[in-house]
Image (spheres, rainbow, N blue to C red):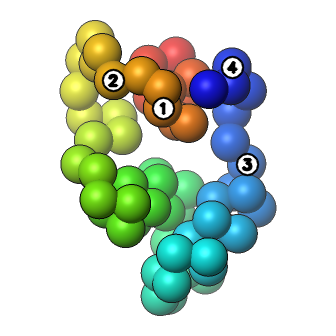
Amino acid sequence: MSNKKVTKAVLITMAKALGIKKISTMKKTELIHAIQRAEGNTDCFGRIENCGVTPCLFRKECQG
């Protein structure tokens, strides 16, 4: 999607829209994992080397 990193503010907005609870206590990586799960995806951020999943909103930070 984009080559820019996703800010925590954007992640919080996304998480709220997905109905994720306890957002304020989550670190950025935890938010990304929660968003991935809520969207029906594997919570793979930062866990897979040489990931081939595209498009991915988090790819820049994950593989960067």
What is the CA distance from the residue labelled 2 to the residue labelled 1? 7 Å
Label 3 CA crowd tier, 10 Å (few <14, some 14–19, many 20+): few
Label 2 CA crowd tier, 10 Å (few <14, some 14–19, many 20+): few
Residue for badge 1 = 56
Q: Earlier in the sequence, mark 3 or mark 1?
A: 3
Residue for badge 3 = 7
Q: Nearer the viewer, residue 55 or 7?
A: 55
Q: Quick one: quadrant of the N terminus?
A: top right
Report if residue 25 is visible in the image.
Answer: no
Identity of the amino acid at label 2? Val
The residue drawn where x is 57% and y is 23% is 60
Q: Is residue 10 left or right of residue 61?
A: right
Q: Secondary structure at mark 1?
A: loop
The residue drawn where x is 25% and y is 35% is 47
Query: Where 4 falls versus 28 (above or below)?
Result: above
Residue 3, which numbered label? 4
Q: Secondary structure at mark 3?
A: loop
